[in-house]
Image (spheres, rainbow, N blue to C red):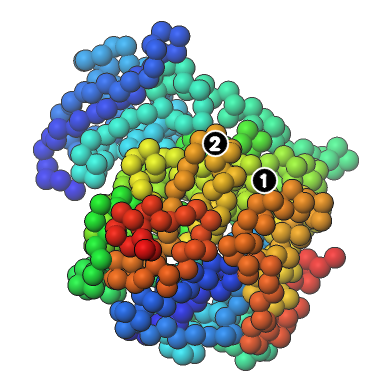
């Protein structure tokens, strides 16, 4: 940390008013501030003292409301808990942009509509079996061990930093986003929820398998909800509930049985396991181009030494997954 | 220096140019690569999705093999590195550990967690050192602008891997600079290549790969380099379909990390399996005076 006393904070702030400005631009401001000052306070000072037209969204200033998420030197995070000192020390300046993957309303304010729509899609509420209503006077009939299974996810403050950081959201509107899936996990493992099976079956076709497990969401999350890890959990639960019905689950289960055969991956076979024979035809033209350069894609590797150990490990640990 | 060499599946089959270049560099730096024909596939993140405990057990077995020889494990694949590291971490959970030990013990395999998991990039930067690398450079990659593509699994989850900053890593760029190349900084360098969904939804995977290549290109890169053969598949082998998906010519040569090291150390391009790439590397080779005559 820098020595005590104020530092100079060079800011480059994204400015854009759709329908008025021809294109987005960055406006520079320079502010003196103590290194520990949160970026949000610095931006509010800019607005109060220099430029009253700067638009941003915020409320609690205490990392509870989740309103002030933005991209700060390219990372999606909360402005209220990002001190300016370390940012300036690392980058020499602070580039402030609105969150990604959501349309800009003005400057740092984005339209969170799509984010909330996807959250609604997963039906984020308990679906209690009407035949087994919650016992009177016992609103929370769970054991500590049951609660432990999803104790991370209720910490989520729906700031959308994960959604902003997610490359799958950026590339494919069919992906519900990290937050929605982490929340879905929370209902799936809640012992009071009666719709677990339905939820798992539905999500297999509604984007679960588009997660890239790049962990950018886990990196972005200010509350350590670790969405990428909960999405992994959902995938395993979905396979256990319904089997491998989609390309994503077929790929995961196919990979698992593929590994068992030789101890190493047989690349050619994996393509067939995932796409099926029909789907392989679509892969054929480019597949041939790859094969011309890398003929091993059509080969079967020699089994590893001690392959029988792999069999024994599968026998011990993969019984409940076998059809 | 002596390390357990964990090549992973791709470097032994369709990406064997990576294995060739790794061995070339290791020879040059007197790194002894100890091979273990008992090593299995790491599950590549897919087995983890299907059965977490099984995935941990398979990799605990891999780690136990290196432990028995008293060696740290060096991978040349970010994903293998990630899966082996993840297994070590999960083995600190007593419930997981009990299940895995229960499966390994009857096989006479005991996992202790004493071997470190590392990657060629880390070995070069941390153990060999940039000074020793510079001393070996006979064909500086001067004038070649290279976009390092870290991908995901060397960097994230950062609190578990405990290496470089996941937002501003610099080890790869430091290495490229030591080889005489000019590192190009672009945002996509720490993002995903799209590979995990290449077989789930190829159009989305291709768009993601295409974006990262376009980003490197917009920042002036003549070539990209990757520490992961799966990223290489996305960025090189599937670059043509990615071109169609982003609607722009890409024509970006993509090198495996040790190929660039070997080139700078004076290797002939023919020794490095460059003809196995789908995107021709000649334009980049010409820039450093290594093009075949």
Residue name at image x 59 percent, y 88 percent? B109
Name the subunit of mark 2.
B
Q: Quadrant of the C terminus of chain A?
A: bottom right
Q: Is residue B234 visible?
A: yes
Say which quarter of the image contains residue B203: top right
Q: Disc count in the image?
A: 2
Q: Residue at x 44, y 34 (%)?
A: A64
Q: Is residue B242 left or right of residue A55?
A: right
Read off the residue under disc 1.
B201
Quadrant location of residue B188? top left
The residue positioned 39% from the left and 34% from the top of the image is A71
Where A36 falls versus B145 (above or below)? above
**Outermost residue toward the top in this view:** A20
Element assignment for label 2: helix
Disc 2 to disc 1: CB gap under 8 Å: no
Foreground of the two, B259 or B231: B259
Closer-to-camera residue (A241/B261): B261
Residue A221 in the image: state x and y as whole percent: 47, 43
3D distance between C-alphas at marks 2 and 1: 15 Å
User: What's the mark number on residue A271?
Assistant: none
Observer-nearest residue: A294 or A119?
Answer: A294
Residue B187, visible in the rendered structure: no
Looking at the rendered structure, whether the residues under marks 2 and 1 are on a common chain is answered as yes
**Residue hosting label 2:** B246
């Amino acid at each position: 940390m820098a020595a005590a006393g104020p530092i100079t904070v060079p800011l480059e702030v994204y400015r854009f008013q759709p329908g008025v400005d021809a294109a987005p631009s960055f406006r520079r401001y320079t502010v003196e501030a103590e290194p520990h000052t949160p970026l949000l306070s610095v931006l509010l000072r800019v607005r109060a003292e220099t430029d009253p037209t700067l638009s941003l969204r915020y409320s609690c200033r205490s990392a509870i409301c989740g309103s002030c998420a933005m991209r700060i030197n390219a990372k999606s995070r909360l402005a209220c808990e990002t001190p300016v000192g370390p940012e300036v020390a690392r980058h020499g300046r602070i580039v402030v942009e609105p969150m990604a993957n959501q349309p800009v309303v003005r400057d740092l304010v984005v339209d969170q509509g799509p984010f909330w729509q996807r959250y609604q899609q997963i039906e984020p509420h308990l679906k209690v079996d009407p035949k087994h209503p919650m016992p009177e006077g016992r609103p929370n009939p769970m054991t500590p061990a049951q609660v432990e299974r999803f104790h991370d996810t209720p910490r989520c403050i729906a700031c959308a930093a994960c959604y902003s950081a997610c490359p799958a959201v950026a590339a494919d509107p069919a992906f519900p986003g990290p937050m929605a899936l982490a929340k879905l996990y929370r209902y799936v493992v809640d012992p009071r929820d009666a719709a677990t099976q339905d939820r798992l079956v539905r999500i297999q076709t509604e984007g679960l398998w588009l997660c890239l497990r790049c962990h950018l969401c886990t990196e972005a999350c200010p509350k350590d909800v670790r969405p990428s890890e909960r999405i992994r959990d959902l995938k395993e639960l979905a396979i256990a509930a319904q089997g491998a019905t989609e390309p994503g689950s077929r790929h995961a289960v196919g990979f698992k049985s593929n590994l068992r055969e030789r101890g190493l991956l047989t690349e050619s076979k994996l393509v067939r396991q995932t796409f099926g024979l029909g789907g392989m035809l679509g892969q054929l033209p480019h597949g041939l181009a790859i094969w011309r350069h890398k003929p091993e894609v059509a080969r079967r590797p020699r089994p590893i030494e001690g392959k029988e150990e792999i069999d024994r490990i599968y026998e011990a640990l993969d019984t409940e997954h076998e059809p | 220096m002596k390390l357990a060499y964990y090549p992973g599946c791709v470097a032994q089959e369709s990406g064997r140019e990576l294995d060739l270049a790794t061995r070339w560099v290791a020879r040059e730096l007197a790194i002894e690569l100890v091979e273990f024909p008992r090593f299995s596939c790491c599950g590549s993140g897919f087995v983890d999705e299907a059965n977490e405990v099984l995935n941990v057990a398979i990799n605990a077995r891999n780690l136990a093999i290196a432990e028995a020889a008293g060696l740290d494990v060096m991978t040349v694949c970010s994903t293998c590195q990630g899966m082996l590291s993840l297994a070590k971490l999960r083995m600190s959970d007593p419930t997981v550990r009990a299940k895995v030990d229960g499966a390994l013990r009857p096989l006479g395999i005991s996992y202790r967690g004493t071997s470190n998991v590392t990657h060629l990039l880390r070995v070069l930067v941390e153990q060999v050192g940039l000074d020793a690398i510079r001393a070996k450079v006979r064909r500086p990659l001067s004038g070649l602008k290279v976009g390092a593509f870290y991908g995901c699994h060397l960097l994230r989850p950062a609190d578990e891997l405990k290496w470089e900053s996941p937002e501003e890593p610099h080890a790869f760029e430091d290495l490229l600079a030591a080889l005489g190349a000019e590192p190009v900084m672009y945002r996509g360098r720490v993002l995903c290549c799209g590979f995990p969904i290449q077989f789930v939804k190829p159009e989305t995977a291709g768009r993601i790969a295409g974006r990262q290549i376009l980003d490197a290109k917009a920042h002036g890169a003549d070539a990209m380099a990757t520490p992961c053969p799966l990223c290489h598949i996305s960025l090189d082998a599937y670059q043509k379909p990615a071109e169609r998906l982003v609607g722009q010519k890409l024509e970006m040569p993509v090198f495996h990390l040790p190929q660039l090291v070997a080139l700078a150390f004076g290797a002939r391009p023919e020794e490095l399996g460059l003809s196995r790439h789908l995107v021709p590397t000649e334009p980049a080779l010409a820039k450093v005076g290594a093009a075949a005559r």
